[in-house]
Image (tube, rainbow, N blue to C red):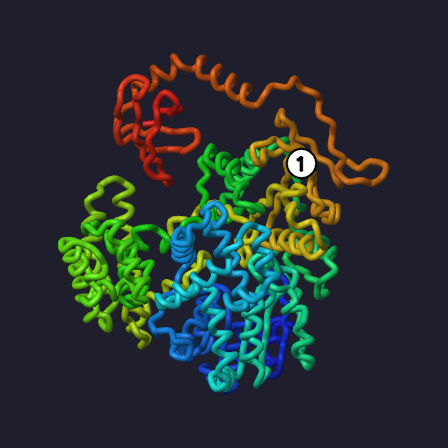
Amino acid sequence: MSDFLNELNPSQKQAVQQTEGPLMVIAGAGSGKTRVLTYRVANLISKGIDPFNILALTFTNKAAKEMRERINQLIGSEAQNLWMGTFHSIFSKILRFESDKLNYPKNFTIYDSADSKNLIKSIVKELNLDKDIYKPNVILGRISSLKNNLISYKAYMSDSKLQAEDASRKLNEMAMVYRTYQHRLFTSGSMDFDDLLFNTHILLRDFPETLNKYQNKFKYILVDEYQDTNQVQYMIVKRLAAMNENICVVGDDAQSIYAFRGANIQNILNFKIDYPDFCTVKLEQNYRSTQTIVNAANSVIKHNKNQIKKTVFSKNGVGDIIKVCKTMSDNEEGQIVGQSIFETQMNNQCFFNEFAILYRTNAQSRSLEESLRRRNIPYKIYGGLSFYQRKEVKDLLAYFRLLINPSDEESLKRIINYPARGIGTTTIQKLIVCSRKNKVSIWECIENPFYHPRIGVNNGTLQKLKAFALMMNSFKVQLQEDAFILAESIAKSSILLKELDKDKTPEGVSRYENVQELLNAIKEFVEKNKKVGEPYTLDYFMQDVALITDQDNDDKDNFNKVTMMTIHAAKGLEFPYVYIVGLEENLFPSQLAVHSREELEEERRLFYVALTRAKKKIQLSYATSRWRWGQLTDCEPSRFLQEIDEEFLDWQYQTKRNFQTKTKGIPFRDNTNKLFVKPKRPKTKFIPKQASTYLTKANAAMSKVGSENTKNQQLQAGMRVNHERFGKGKILQIEGLSDNKKAIIFFDGLGQKTLLLKFAKLDIIA
């Protein structure tokens, strides 16, 4: 172990060797905190601490996996005995052990956000509430916030202030929705993600013997990204650590950016109050970025008053000055970014996955995507639909979930008539009514002959319900066997695979392949768990799947692509080349976050995070006008640009003629030292937007109609074509006549689309 300690700098070594008592490690961006956490655990084990007595909490499975692998390399197989994982995975494990205390089954289902939204939709419909007011996202966000602040539905119903707050937003029946939602989860033997934390808190609060059990078990506790913890996470950790106080928290207050989802920066700022005998270690050397990038980030974050002071530095060399580009519009901004990526990639012969485009909101991606498409630059949007969220995958998973937990209502409703077996919507509604009246699950209404007369369906439908129950029960005898054998049996016996195989379109083939890939994942899970002596039944696989996050999904097909994402999604990642776009007032910082110092400081921390993602080069850009909510609005440069010391910036000006001039320092200062005085625009003749758009389109159509018709007549199935928006693709079929002539085209990376040829702009390429 001593050899490994020699790889650490003095601050890192102190953080690793200080094993007793409360320790707060302030880890600046790129300072090697993962290495510190890894070596700290390895050091504890080398000193004779039993791995079963160490609890390490992270925010992503990816981070936990990386740490476990590193520890395994240092100390061997003992790493398998660590309690290491995300808050949700660790606490779900505890809840399965102690589920009886909370009257939950050990095999309770974990609802993801899609499941929860579907349940809320059902509740809103049953309660005859306005679906335009009681939107699933709004309701789920509110319930999540309440749970993360330890407010149960009972506490909410007795709090007039909270109810008045929701009533002001026309959510007068929020108490009823919250109560029904929780009741429905409970009767289904299910928990949502927030319940995994909320119920763990209840377990440790209301059952002293259980709290004592886990306090004795977890003698050493480590928490990664402590600045991102919310109230319920904070309370759980505090209770668990109360006996031994051997708690090490690692984080960076300057990277606290998740207040919108309940993270409380005060948790890390008040660590010294919770643990007066604490020790602090600051990791201030940045191993990721150049000195220029680090200095620029420091010059921004120093404007925050509410922070733990530190001086981050780098020994990676000075590096390139940061470019700032002024553009006339968001479209022009996209063009400049696309051109810069193209030139940098060509000049340096690097991979596209070395580039990242960061923006404040997802809506900003459009102009950037169009620019990249025009240059045939491959890209991926981080946080897109993950594998386990695809419909066909969720369909098969629903079979697994229902088998493991027959009370899971949402899973049953999803697959009772998929593939089609003659059980329609009317029957399902009758089953729901029977379930509610008799206070039993829908499954019990189907399975138990006692309830059959009460369902109110004809004999033919009843036989179909019996056949469905018989099929599901036939799978139960295999529940304790190999997960892959059972999963394959379900996929085939349910006719799901056969149904998917009927569709020979590219999308149909893709769906079939996705289900096959799910079976591959189960096979891999079985083989892996057999090797390490872990359970390999289907219920254990489903536990793993339920806790997968977006950041844990690395699609191999996305390897060599430019990454586009919000800055929030970029947390914890790094790239050699980073483009931060949309640096305008009311966009970044957001207009919703400039009404208080706390909100503005969080936005500044977000900008700090964006800057510190870069290893080699950064380009910043802003537009003087941007389309927002259907209106062309004038934009002012972000105040954050002013906060970067001038010596680190190189201003690049872009005009409509694509003419560039450069100047050192910040432009547009008047004698009063006011930043960015907006240039006056020449007056132009006003043309109503609708009329202008119509005339433009009409003129363009008239001038091109002859040539386009001629070209369209040449199009045939099998041809390779290029579309200015969708890129390259292959014509699968031509159908229709004259003005109604259509082309069915499979576009590379986008899938199948049907285009009306009189409007489609297609170039034949092969």
Task: State the SS at label 1.
Answer: loop
Q: Residue at x 16, y 56 (%)?
A: 464
Above or below, 92 against 724 in this view is below
At a point 25% along the width and 39% down the height, the residue shown is: 505
Which corner quadrant of the image does residue 95 belong to?
Answer: bottom left
- Give the image quarter of residue 506: top left
* Residue 677 appears anywhere in the view: yes
Quadrant of the drawing holding the C terminus? top left
**Horizontal and vertical percent for residue 58?**
51, 68
Near-viewer residue (685 or 459): 459
Spot occupied by residue 377 in the image (x, y as percentages of width and height): 46, 39
Mark 1 Cα within 10 Å, few/some/many (few <14, many 20+)?
many
Q: Measured from the top left, where is residue 751 in percent x and y?
A: 34, 39
- Residue 323 or residue 711, whichever sits in front: 711
Looking at the picture, does residue 719 appear above or below residue 643?
above
Name the residue furthest right: 671
Residue at 44% across, 13% down: 702
Q: Is residue 30 above or below residue 539?
A: above
Q: Nearer the viewer, residue 26 or 318?
A: 26
Q: Which residue, given by chain and number where applicable, does mark 1 sit on?
A: 635
Relative horizontal placement of residue 724, taking residue 620 as reference (left or right): left
- The amino acid on which the numbered mark 1 sits, given as a three-letter code, is Cys
